[in-house]
Amino acid sequence: MIYAILFMISQACHPLLATLFTPPRPEIGHYEVCTRAEALETVIAEGRTAGIQFGEIDAVEPLDGFGSAGAYNRFALVKLYGGMRVRVTRGWRRTEDRFESVTLLSPHPDETLTRLDPGTMVITFILTRRDGRGWTGWDGGDGNDEAGRPGGAGRNQIPPVPPDHDPTRIAMSP
C-alpha cells in the first residue's frame, strides 16, 4: 500500500491533458492523466512495486499510442513527433474495491502539443466498487464524479460477476 501511495504522489496530474487524451464523458469510470519526469522503465519498475501488472514496451506511431478517443489535434501530434515513435506499455491493477487500467507513454507532449517532454505520461482509467453492488465510475455517492459531472456513483454500474460464473463454459441450447 505504501508503494501505491508513493507511486501516485510522485506524479503531477493535468486536467487539460485528460481533456485532450481521454473520452469526454465516459459511461462508467473516470480517467486521470498525469506526468512523471522519470524514464518509462523507472515508472514501470515503481508501478510493479505498487502491484501494477505491465506488458511489454512497444514503439508505435503516435496516433496508435494515444488512440482516437480524445479531442487532441491529430495533425499537431503527428507533426510534433516528426516521424518518431512513442514508447507505450499498458497494464492493470485490481484491489478489493478498485480496478485500474494504466497506459504509460514516453516521450509525451505538453498541454499545447508544441513540445515533447522526455518523461512519462500516465493515463489511468479507474473503476471503483461500492458495497458489493458492482463497479461504478466514482464513489462520491451523489451521482456525480469527482469533478461534479453527471455519471458517477450509482449510474451505469457494471454488475458483479456471480461467484459460480465460469467464463470458459459456453452455454449450449438444445
Image (spheres, rainbow, N blue to C red):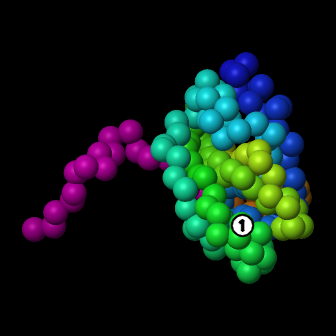
Please indicate, yes or no, whether residue 69 appears anywhere in the rendered image. Answer: no
- In the image: residue 18, left or right of residue 168: right
In percent of width and height, residue 21 lies at 74, 65
- Residue 165 included in the magenta stretch of the image: yes
Residue 123 vs 72, above or below: the answer is above
- Residue 116 included in the magenta stretch of the image: no
Q: Residue at x 68, y 35 (%)?
A: 43
Q: Residue at x 82, y 32 (%)?
A: 10
**Residue farthest along the top direction in this orientation:** 2
Residue 169 vs 60, above or below: the answer is above
In percent of width and height, residue 18 lies at 80, 60
Q: Residue at x 59, y 52 (%)?
A: 88
Q: How many marks?
A: 1
Residue in front for this viewpoint, 102 or 168: 102
Q: Which amino acid lies under the numbered mark 1 shown in the image of this protein?
A: Tyr
Residue in front for this viewpoint, 38 or 134: 38
Neighbor class of circle 1 (other Cα within 10 Å; few <14, some 14-19, many 20+) is some
**Residue farthest along the front direction in this orientation:** 83
In percent of width and height, residue 83 lies at 64, 69
User: Residue 26 occupies which quadrant of the picture?
Assistant: bottom right
The residue indicated by pointer 1 is 81
Q: Main secondary structure of the magenta part?
A: loop
In percent of width and height, residue 137 lies at 70, 53
Q: Quadrant of the N terminus?
A: top right
Residue in front for this viewpoint, 172 or 104: 104
Residue in front for this viewpoint, 140 or 83: 83
Please indicate, yes or no, whether residue 89 appears anywhere in the rendered image. Answer: yes
Which segment is the magenta one?
A: 156-174
Q: Quadrant of the C terminus?
A: bottom left
Q: Residue at x 66, y 28 (%)?
A: 46
